Amino acid sequence: MAEVRPILTGHKSLIVGVANDQSIAYGCAEAFRACGADLAITWLNDKARPHVEPLGEKLGAEIMAPLNVENPGELEAVFDEIGSRWGKLDSLIHSIAFAPKEDLQGGLLDCSAAGFARAMDVSCHSFVRMAKLAAPLMKDGGTMFAMSYLGANRVVTNYNVMGPVKAALEAACRYLAFELGPQNIRVHAISPGPLKTRAASGIKDFEHLLNDAVARSPLHELVDIDDVGFACAYLAADFARRITGGTIYIDGGANIIG
């Protein structure tokens, strides 16, 4: 790894979605910390806490809390703590997604209305809710990130209901970038190539996606969570102060190949 510069010294970052040391959110947390940022991280529930809390301690996270966006009040509690402890926020990373297994593994035609609505709420609308709570804390501007995937704008076999959901998430990023731009808040949809994460294990034939990504990529390599983390760290720094509203592909160039 190249020498890391402290480009985020004094930066306060909330990273939502740390599940283990292989998750995209952890890659972001590790990169932001290496660049000098102070961290707040969340875990999903009591089952996840023993796996995530030691990672937060390792990174010196100043705030750690449970956050299930489906539980009333938990989202507000996280932002209340950030407000009282830090009084500000510089970046928000939303790295959570969910669809019921029976709806995810079937085709879109077979997805239930309830499953579709739940996938949309957790994977997309929760980002809008977070943005509304985060914006008042970004008093000097800031950056918001949401994790997407190529299946948002192309058909990816077996991605199913998450394709339309991620398409909505990318659209939400564009509209939020427009609405929050006057407050000097930038919003990015981040679209990594397929990564070996626990969340990806729910996608049928995921190993095929990994192999295809290597074959298609001009660099002929898979990306990893560090690639995603350091790209986001750059985008959160002043170096990228006039970049907003787009989908940033971190996939070795695979998205350009038809």
Image (spheres, rainbow, N blue to C red):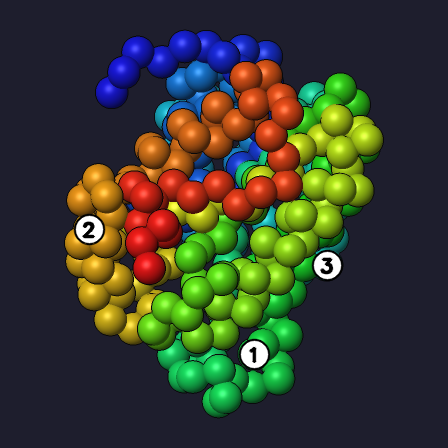
Numbered circle sitting on residue 115: 1
Q: Quadrant of residue 155?
A: bottom left
Q: Residue at x 70, y 41 (%)?
A: 177
> What element does badge 3 sit on?
loop
Q: Residue at x 27, y 16 (%)?
A: 2
Q: Nearer the viewer, residue 147 or 33?
A: 147
Residue 193: x and y, percent?
34, 49
Earlier in the chain: of badge 2 and badge 1, it is 1
Q: Nearer the viewer, mark 2 or mark 1?
A: 2
Left or right: 185 in relation to 100: right
Which residue is identified by label 3?
Answer: 72
* Any part of residue 41 in sight: yes
Earlier in the chain: of badge 3 and badge 2, it is 3
Q: Nearer the viewer, mark 3 or mark 1?
A: 1
Q: Quadrant of residue 114?
A: bottom right
Residue 95: x and y, percent?
50, 47
Mark 3 in CB contact with mark 2 (< 8 angstroms): no
Q: Nearer the viewer, residue 45 or 220?
A: 220
Vertical relation: 75 (above or below) 209:
above
Mark 2 in CB contact with mark 1 (< 8 angstroms): no
